[in-house]
Structure formats: C-alpha cells, structure tokens
Image (cartoon, rainbow, N blue to C red):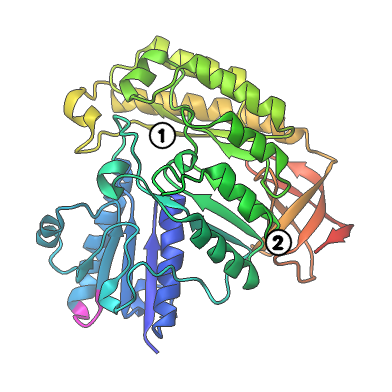
Amino acid sequence: MPQYYVWTIGCQMNKAESERLASLFEQRGYQATATAEQADLIVLNGCVVRQSAENRITNKLNNLKVLKKARPGLTLAVTGCLVDSNIEQLKQDFPYVDHFFKPGDYPYWLETTEGTQALPQHPPPSFYVPIMQGCDNFCTYCIVPYRRGRERSRPLAVISDEVRELVRRGVREVTLLGQNVDSYGHDLPDKPDLADLLTELNAIDDLARLRFLTNHPKDMSTRLIETIARLDKVCEQLNLPVQSGSNDILQAMRRGYTVEHYRQLITELRSKIPGLALSTDIIVGFPSESAEQFQQTFNLLSELRFDAVHVACYSPRAETIAARELEDNVSATEKKRRLDIIEQQQESIATEINGQLLGTAVEVLVEGKNKGKWQSRTRSGKLVFFSGNSHHLGQLVNIRIEKTSPWSLQGRLETGKSN
C-alpha cells in the first residue's frame, strides 16, 4: 500500500485543509506514515504570514530535494499560502516539486471531484470545519487576501450537512474557520450570517460543543454576541485580535476600528457572556511604532487581562501595502525586546487567571492521550491533563483542578457526568 506524509505549519485553516487532504489520500488507497523518508507522496502545507514561517518551508523543500533526487518516483506537492498566482516562478525556484496547488484547492491531479470536501472515516473528537475562504479587509501587513483571495462563503446547508455527517462519525466538537468568520454569508444569495449558522448547528443532536475563529473587531455585531450568549453549545471562548493599543498604529494597519471601540466591545462581550475566556493577537514593531505607542499596547493588555495573547514581531511581506509603502524601521533587537515584555506580562496575567480555578471542578472534552495522561479542554479552551486508565476519548467528564500554570491545568477525574 502506498504511503503519504503531510507536513503542516501555520494557522488552523492550514491544519483543517491538511486533515481533508489526508482523508482524500486515504480514500485513494494511501496509508499515513510518520516520516517523509518512508512516503511515496509528500505534501507540504506552508505558511508565509511571517518570514520565519516562509524560511521553514523553503528549508524543508531544500532538504527534500536530496530525497527527491534519490527517489525520482516520489511525488512531491506544495500547497498553502506559499503558492501564489505566479506558479511558474515557483516551478523555476523548485523544479523538483511535482505539483503546486493554491490554499483551499484540492489535488486534482489525483482525479478527485472538484469542490469535494473529504471527511475522515475515523475523525478525532474535535474537528475543524472551514466555512469560508479569503479576506476582503486588506490590512496593510497581511498577505492573506493576496494568497487566498476575496471572501467566499460556503452555503449554510452544505456546512450543516457536513457537520451532521462528522457527528455521525463520532465528532463531538467542531471549530468553524475563516480568515474573518464575522463576515460569513454576506456573499451568499440569501445573506445568512454567522449567528444563523451557529443557530442551525446548535440544534444538531449529539454535537456537544461549537467554537469559531478568527473574529474581526469591526465586524462583530451585537446580534452575534447575543446569539453566543443564548446558544448552549457555543463555548465561552473567543479570539478577538486587537493587534495594537495605539490608534495611530491601528490606522496605519488599516484595521478599521479604534482602541475605544475595541474596549467597548470587550465590555459588551463580558457583560453578556459570563465566564468568557478571551484571547487576542498583537504585532510589535510595526513600522514607526514608537516606545510610547508600544507602551499603549502594554497598558491595554494590562487593563483588559486576556486569558491568552499571541504576539509576533512585524515581518514585512512582499505584495502587502506596508511592505510597499512603509519603512521597516524598528530594529530586530527592539522588536524582540518588546515581544519578550509582552510575553512576560501575559505569563503573569495567565498565572493569576488560571490560579483562580485551583480546587474547582470543570467540565472537559477528552481529546486523546499525551505522554501517558489524558489531554482535554474546558469550554473556555483551557488545556487540562489528568490520569486515568478507562477509555475516556470523546467523553465529557468532570475534573477537579489540583495544579495550575499559565499554559495548562492538571487535576483528577471526578465521578459523575460522563457521556
């Protein structure tokens, strides 16, 4: 039986697309292997949102060149945001790659049906479901619209049927994905929105939990917030990227909102959704970001106290507005210093937030085993580890928290709810 290997870096959308590719390959008679050296088919699904990610995939490609030379019959394919409209240039740069296909597309060289959404025969308890592709926002630093195109929503009925089939196959939790899920449906004939989709999926029997990401502050409506609060399966967890605490930097990023608007949105979310866990994204060292503007970001994070902060140094991306029009004039050393400050600050905040759960009982969905312990998540998205010999995969169980850290929780299984 031929073997395949899929290597993935980047966002949850890349991971979701790799899961579907793996299912397609298995339907075509391939078997997964843990190493590229054993594979007959290798697919690299890469990210170029930051230079470090692009470097990783080009290094991986260069390493595979030796393997391809030794085994000419090996099929090597590349997808993800590395693949832009200039595929001919990629073929010149990497002539030993057999196939390039754009993110969100499918390997038609396998003679699959166009548009097929391959689903796993034996899926994990949690599964990513893309609901749209592309982005219309064109933030000045972001390459996504240039690589994934404009927003294209999948029909509500198609998504609903897919989730029902996933649940039938054993999935307990789905995470809806889009570069900007809050604008879902605006391009469809009947104009459904994310609130409509969540309401539809919430009614599916045996589906335990619903999540979605990523959100955009300028597009999150009161109707959506009230829907989240009303629906019992929608988890109390949101990622709402702010990117900067400076209005001048937000304007330069072309984000479309102010710090004041963002602060009001957080207040509304927390007042209407008790127990909400919030995470955010931050870019440090954006062109011309001053020490004072960075301090404004630090102060905003101190004020709002997020459960998690994903921070990255600004990296100029070819084709983007910022790369064309703005000078990357914050040194790499200063960017790293600012990143370290934010990470240290967030570690302290997360330590305090998670410490409040010590001694409490939390409901978790068990995702699998990790280093001999069961790995699970709360409705608020916190990672929980516990010991146990019984088969708990895919179950909802109660865990009494006995140890906390900024990144995860540990506890013991309690008798009671398990399904």
- The kind of secondary structure element at disc 2 is strand
- Tell me if mark 2 has few (under 14), some (14-19) or many (20+) residues whose alpha carbon lies within 10 angstroms of its own: some
Tell me how far mark 2 sits from mark 1, CA to CA: 31 Å
Say which residue appears at 9% left-offset and 60% top-offset. 92
**Mark 2 or 1, nearer chain start:** 1
Is residue 72 shown in magenta?
Answer: yes
Query: 336 or 106: nearer the eye?
Result: 106
Q: Quadrant of residue 25?
A: bottom left
**Of marks 2 and 1, the one in the foreground:** 1
* Residues drawn in magenta: 70-75
User: How far across and how far down the image is residue 316, in percent?
Assistant: 25, 33
Q: Is residue 170 visible?
A: no
- Looking at the figure, which quarter contains the C terminus? bottom right
User: How far across and how far down the image is residue 41, in percent?
Assistant: 31, 76
- The kind of secondary structure element at disc 1 is strand
Is residue 40 shown in magenta?
Answer: no
Q: Quadrant of residue 144?
A: top left
User: How far across and how far down the image is residue 118, in percent?
Assistant: 45, 71
- Looking at the figure, which quarter contains the N terminus? bottom left
In the shown orientation, is residue 349 left or right of residue 178? right
* Residue 373's disc number: 2
Say which residue appears at 74% left-offset and 32% top-offset. 274
Q: Please name the residue that numbered disc 1 is placed on.
A: 312
- Tell me if mark 1 has few (under 14), some (14-19) or many (20+) residues whose alpha carbon lies within 10 angstroms of its own: many
Say which residue appears at 41% left-offset and 49% top-offset. 189
* Amino acid of disc 1: Ala
* Amino acid of disc 2: Lys
**52 vs 66: above or below:** above
Q: Is residue 91 visible?
A: yes
